[in-house]
Image: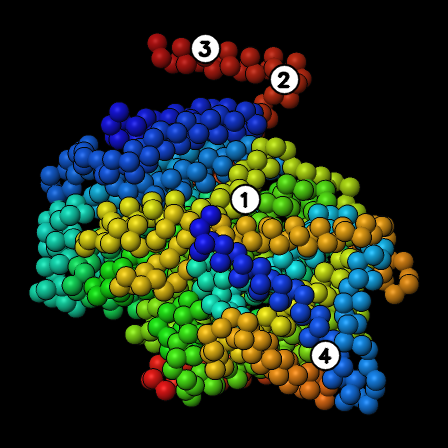
Amino acid sequence: MSHVFLLGLAGALLLGGAIVSLALARHRILSGWLAFGAATAAGVAVFAVVVDTFRAGAGQETVLLRLPVLGAAWTVLVDPLSAFFLAIAAAICVLSALFSVHYMAHFERDSVARFYPVLLVFLASVVGVLVTTDFLFFLVFWELMTLTSFFLVTFESESRTTQRAGRKYFIVTHAATLGLIAGALVLWQTSGSFHFGAMRDALATLLGTRPLVGNLVILLFLLGFATKAGVLPMGDWLPDAHPVAPSGMSAVLSGALVKIGIYGLLRVFCGFVPVAGPVAGWGIVLALAGTGSLFVAMPTALAQTDSKRLMAFSTVGQIGYICLGLGVGLYCLPDRPALAALALMGALFHTANHACFKACLFLGAGAVLYRTGERNMDKLGGLGGAMPVTASSSMLASLSIAGVPPLNGFASKWLILATCLLAGMTAPLFLVLGIVGLFISLVTLASFLKVVGAVFLGQPSEDPRVREVPWTMAAPQAVLAALCVLLGVFPQVPLRLAHAALASAVQIDLPSSQALIGGPWTLAPSIGGLSVAFWAPLTIAAALVVLSALAYGLQRSAAARVRRVDVWTCGEPHGPSAVRYPATSLFVPFKDAFHGIYPAVPARAPAFPPALRKALDLDRWLFMPAARAVDRAAHGVGLTHAGIPQLYLLWIVVAAAVVVAIVLLAS
Amino acid sequence: MTTGALQVLGLCALNVLVAGLLSPLFEGMLRKLRAIVHSRMGPPLTQPYLDLLKLLGKEDLRTTGGVLSALGPAMTLGSVLVLAMLVPMGAPPPLGFAGDVIVLVYVAGMGAVFLMLTAFASGSPYAFVGGSREMMLLLAVEPAMAIALVVGAVKAGTLATGAIAAWQAANGPSLSTILAGLALFLALQAQAGKLPFDIAEADQEVMGGPLVELSGPRLALVRWALWARQLVVACLLVEVFAPWPRLGLLPLDLALTLVKALVVLVLVAVIDVVNPRLRVDQALRYYLRVGFSALAALAFAVIGM
């Protein structure tokens, strides 16, 4: 079956599912199951396309709709780069839909009619963004994606913070979209077509004739996509919007939506910007933006006490790592394609990994929220015993994001840092950036040890409501945690796919993935035939397991008696909540050192002109006066109905007299 | 199985045995040294071994029943022993094909991660304070350690630990590597948990910090892991930043490395004896300076000095 047919099928399933789940929104659980079913069926179709693309390469470009007046045509093409992101987005959306089935049932006020249908349309628009190769239609889907995600973020209609965060998201991302439109229009003016290929040629021409305008166009694209990806300072919307969305949607935002920004950056910088041109300079810009972003966001994450806000800030930080990898890759692209390919593969791999662990963490925070109604880590603690699946999944994901070998977060961070340091041997700036990256990964570790320690570990919670979440919520977390382990231990598979994705996107020939990452069990990137960095996850994992098992054997060797005792609190008995060490108190001197690194600028929205407000307020000058007039008239008519028979008789007599008078006068 | 694989396994076993079996002896010597400075007799050199044996048989008191508190100490020791296999000891690191200096830095942090998780799992507020301090020390120390190793990597043009050590052995000292070695030495003080940086365990303040609720065999494993870690990091320091002379014969090279490591640890212990404990914010400031000085070493390395 052709790609377009399968994608069309997926789109039809999603839109059909949206309509059906909208119709049945009164039944919360049923509507959720229907949405999950539609998402899964569409996901299967999308995965068929993904598998076929990776096996057989990019398909044929298909024209679905022509707008010759504008020089635009809706062309659809799935190449491996699209397929890579399609796989991430579809997987995360399906798992989040499953998680949401029971999760959304606990919002009593807000109807799920505003969630599931929008979620399905959102997924359809993401698929549209990823497969379209014409900028006009790309922007149409991009806008649809932004709008649907805005409605998903602002789902909790009665919360002021939610509405505020949603408004910020709406304004900031639309400003960014404006940049995209402006850039596209400049290129369109040169070439007269919105097709990606034509735009690439137009950009090359523009850079040749008017380099300043050409670079300005690149800057506009960078701003547009980096804002969506959440690179600071444009990504300032992200730490507000991600925590307030329903948890399933937070996972989709961090797992899939911000990745679309990365996709855009890759498309533009690998596909559009000519390799012989200013790509190396833009590599430095991206690397600096990424490093700045991670250096500001992670210490800020460490200082948060709201678990979801902490995770949102860490998304900004991890996107910083991805941008650092992209930057190193672009910088090396003209001269050292091997190193460039490795760095870009690292960035893509980190994109996939971040989708796994961050979605898992957001779902974990959602599970805790579902059972306790609490996001403040100071008020949580000791949930691990009662929620074993949630706790162990969140812990694996936390260790993964912190870069503990041999989990997946380490594998991709290692590739990014190794290429950064290797690039730094000739361009010392990257040495400093690599060391900042190393340091910040420790801050990540501290942040997520705080989450694990403060929420799940410690003395068991005394809260009677706390027990494991239903399986529909536990299973997605377990799947994502398992993916964290599998991708970490077998990094060759995702790296091969990332290589295929890049080979289709960049404009030069890359060395084969075999030559780049070495043997089947060891990642040994070689530069100029010499292996200069090594990571063999299976070997290290096996060594760790064997040695830990030996150590455990030693622990049990003397058959020491095990006895349960209370925590020693200096001889006086205290309950767990009385002696619990609050999350705020962890790492205080270190947090103080970074105080104020994320400046909170008190921004006041410009005052809305009162006259305009009045003009727009139809209630005030049209509906309410009209309603009141009708009401008054009805009241006046009502006065005639006093309920006294004599009065009614009088009315009849008067009416008869009037009728007679009219008849007499008329004749 | 090929001879190559057997050789790797043999070297792995050797490194693990050195780190596992000799580290209590080193600890015994350091205790003796401390006693001499205090004008005491001090315990016999074998005391750490006896301590371990005794602890292994003692009752294991647990505050929480979780898997983490049961397995955490074993994972701590296991990860320190994995670190031992990534560090050269008289020969190139046996698992050098599986991990470069970046892996080494992360694996070095792993032991601390498992120790902190064990501590948090116990639920004791003292363990939380200790774990928090341990994490902050890690934040302060690991960058200095990483920068020092990156200096070696820049000089040698590779990230492979063994190749960096070999390059050092062949090319002799230079300004940048001396400065970097110094930074790693200063980082060792905190890595070994010695005064003035025994802030995490700080017996008089937080009663052992992460160790407060550990007892019996679990305490034995954690203590053992801490002793092994100080020996392994000392070996890393002398192998990467002072590998001379390289005799080419494994037993002799190993013996030489261990003697040099002992000298380094004796220096660490002397600093330990004559210093009071710093507060954690003071330690952070101190290592911030160490880190920036190490960056100077990196600058020298970049310009080829």
Q: Residue at x 58, y 81 (%)?
A: B260
Mark 4 residue element:
helix
Q: Which residue is mark 4?
A: B29
Marks 2/4 same chain: no
User: Is disc 3 surrounded by few (<14), some (14 to 19) or many (20+) residues within 10 Å?
Assistant: few
Residue designated by label 1: A481
Where is mark 2, residue-wise? A647
Amino acid, disc 4: Met
| Residue at 36% in and 64% down | A532
Subunit bearing disc 2? A
The residue lying toward the viewer, choosing from A529 and A104, is: A529
Name above or below for residue A377 compared with residue A417: above
Q: Which of the marked residues, 3 or 2, is nearer the chain's N terminus?
A: 2
* SS state under label 3: helix
- Residue A426: image location, x then y, percent: 30, 74
Please report the residue visible at 46 percent of the width from the left and 35 percent of the height from the top. Answer: A94
The residue labelled by disc 3 is A660
